[in-house]
């Protein structure tokens, strides 16, 4: 009938008998208390307490103590004079912490008094309009001006949001300057702006050179944020144009600091020291015939050979230098080859880059490889109209009857100069038949003497 909620039913009547709107603890308790839970945390600036005034039951708060429960759950006593007679006590609260519960306690009453109870007709708590604390990360909140009741975060409070080094002010996603760093608690219990401190981000650096890669070291909150570094590396075969490779650094103004160079192709210059008696072919590298990765292959001229077989190719290296040339093109001594350079018993003479052959009789050609056709090349090989027959490395002459010799250069009738003058062998036989018989014998004798079987055979026909 007199339950606790009557103290917070919105009815401030203090006439207990008439209106029945006051709460009432049981009589005879030595430690009576009554509490109201505010169902949240509030800055409270005034508490009004209405008590019984209708005689004879009154002053049932006489000696009571007022407590409030603050954010750290500790009950704190609020001083007020609870002695009768005021119908309503108005208590100012000056705590700078928020309150979740209000309690009236009376331990001064004794059990010997039958009317030991707390009776309260209404309790009103007046809130100070306040905003929630600002949950700021990476920055600090400075109070510029206290608000209502001089309490933190109350209506009218002004705060200065100061971001830590490397962070900058944002409202939603818009970057703000320092001029916009003040926020104020409004009557709606919300702050005028919601500010955050986000890491300064320089983004990906612009103007990085071609043929390069960049490696980064994270800053305060990622690879492109304040204090991040970005180091440029030229790709293989390229040199950085700047003397020292200082990394770019993401600065406090949101820009990358540092110089950006170029990546230039490595060139080795002209390849010097190519062996004598050689030619070379070039396979272009990155950009032209002297650039990185260019290869040059040496080919010795005919008659020469490289002294380091298989190592005739040189390349433009990453250090901008050609790989060293190790060999030379030396003369091949063709005369010492397993297969004779000069054929058919030609005599070989070695020369620088070549050789020469002195051919045996009957042969010709650079390597004496060809038989000389003496019957063509030498019209007068066989004399006295003898028939010439070419043979490998030599020739034969088939002589008319009256001639003999290798080249038919010899007249058979050396003993008879008149017969030698005959140009008609058949006529000779007819006229001088008997003489010929003698000549035949003589011829045989001559044949034996000259040991020329071919001529003899011909003469017998
Ligand atoms: Ca040679
Ligand atoms: Ca011949």
Image (spheres, rainbow, N blue to C red):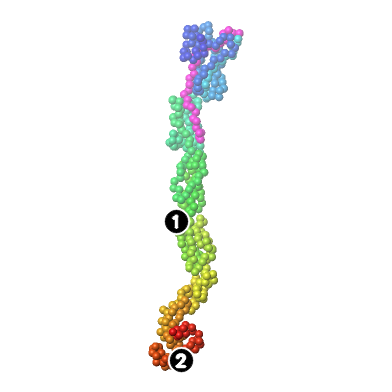
Mark 2, Cα crowd under 10 Å, few <14 / some 14-19 / many 20+, is few
Q: Residue at x 52, y 61 (%)?
A: 310
The magenta span reads 112-140
Quadrant placement of the C terminus: bottom left
Image height of 458 relative to 123, above or below: below
Q: Position of residue 214 (x, y in %)?
A: 48, 47
Residue 422 visible here: no
Asked whether mark 1 lies closer than 8 Å to ligand 1, one says: no
The picture places residue 433, in percent across and down from the top left corner, at 42, 91
CA distance separating discs 1 and 2? 98 Å
Residue labelled with disc 2:
438
Q: Secondary structure at mark 2?
A: helix
| Residue at image coords 46%, 14% | 10
User: Residue 390 location in percent, x, y?
Assistant: 44, 78
Predominant secondary structure, magenta span: loop
Which dot marks residue 183? none
Select label 1 or label 2 by which is in front. 2
Residue closer to the observer: 141 or 438: 438
- The numbered dot on residue 287 is 1
| Label located before the other in sequence (1 or 2) | 1
In the image, 432 versus 218, the foreground residue is 432
Number of marks: 2
């Amino acid at each position: 009938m007199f339950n606790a909620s009557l103290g917070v039913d919105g009815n401030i009547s203090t006439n207990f008998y008439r209106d029945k709107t006051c709460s009432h603890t049981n009589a005879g308790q030595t430690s009576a208390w009554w509490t109201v839970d505010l169902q949240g945390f509030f800055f409270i600036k005034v508490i009004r307490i209405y008590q019984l005034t209708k005689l004879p039951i009154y002053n049932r708060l006489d000696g009571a103590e007022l407590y409030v429960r603050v954010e750290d759950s500790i009950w704190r006593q609020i001083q007020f004079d609870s002695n009768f007679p005021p119908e309503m006590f108005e208590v100012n609260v000056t705590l700078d912490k928020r309150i979740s519960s209000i309690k009236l306690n009376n331990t001064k009453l004794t059990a010997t008094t039958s009317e030991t109870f707390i009776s309260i007709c209404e309790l009103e708590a007046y809130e100070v309009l306040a905003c929630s604390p600002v949950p700021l990360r990476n920055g600090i909140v400075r109070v510029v001006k206290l608000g209502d009741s001089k309490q933190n975060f109350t209506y009218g409070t002004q705060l200065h949001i100061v971001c830590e080094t490397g962070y900058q002010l944002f409202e939603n996603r818009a970057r703000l300057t320092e001029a916009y760093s003040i926020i104020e608690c409004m009557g709606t219990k919300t702050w005028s702006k919601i500010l955050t401190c986000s890491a300064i981000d320089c983004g990906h650096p612009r103007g990085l050179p071609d043929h390069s890669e960049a490696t980064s070291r994270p800053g305060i909150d990622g690879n492109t944020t304040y204090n991040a570094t970005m180091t440029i590396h030229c790709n293989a075969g390229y040199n950085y144009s700047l003397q020292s490779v200082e990394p770019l650094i993401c600065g406090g103004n949101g820009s990358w600091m540092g110089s950006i160079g170029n990546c230039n192709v490595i060139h080795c210059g002209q390849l010097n020291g190519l062996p004598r008696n050689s030619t070379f072919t070039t396979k272009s590298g990155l950009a032209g015939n002297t650039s990185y990765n260019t290869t040059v292959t040496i080919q010795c001229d005919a008659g020469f050979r490289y002294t380091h077989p298989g190592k005739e190719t040189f390349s433009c290296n990453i250090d901008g230098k050609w790989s060293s040339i190790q060999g030379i093109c030396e003369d091949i001594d063709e005369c010492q080859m397993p297969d004779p350079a000069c054929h058919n018993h030609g005599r070989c003479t070695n020369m620088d880059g070549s050789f020469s052959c002195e051919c045996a009789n009957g042969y010709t050609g650079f390597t004496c490889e060809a038989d000389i056709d003496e019957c063509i090349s030498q019209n007068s090989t066989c004399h006295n109209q003898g028939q010439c027959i070419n043979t490998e490395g030599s020739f034969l002459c088939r002589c008319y009857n009256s001639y003999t010799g290798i080249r038919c250069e010899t007249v058979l009738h050396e003993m008879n100069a008149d017969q030698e003058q005959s140009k008609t062998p058949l006529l000779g036989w007819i006229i001088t038949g008997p003489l010929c018989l003698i000549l035949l014998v003589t011829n045989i004798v001559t044949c034996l003497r000259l040991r020329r079987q071919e001529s003899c055979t011909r003469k017998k026909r």
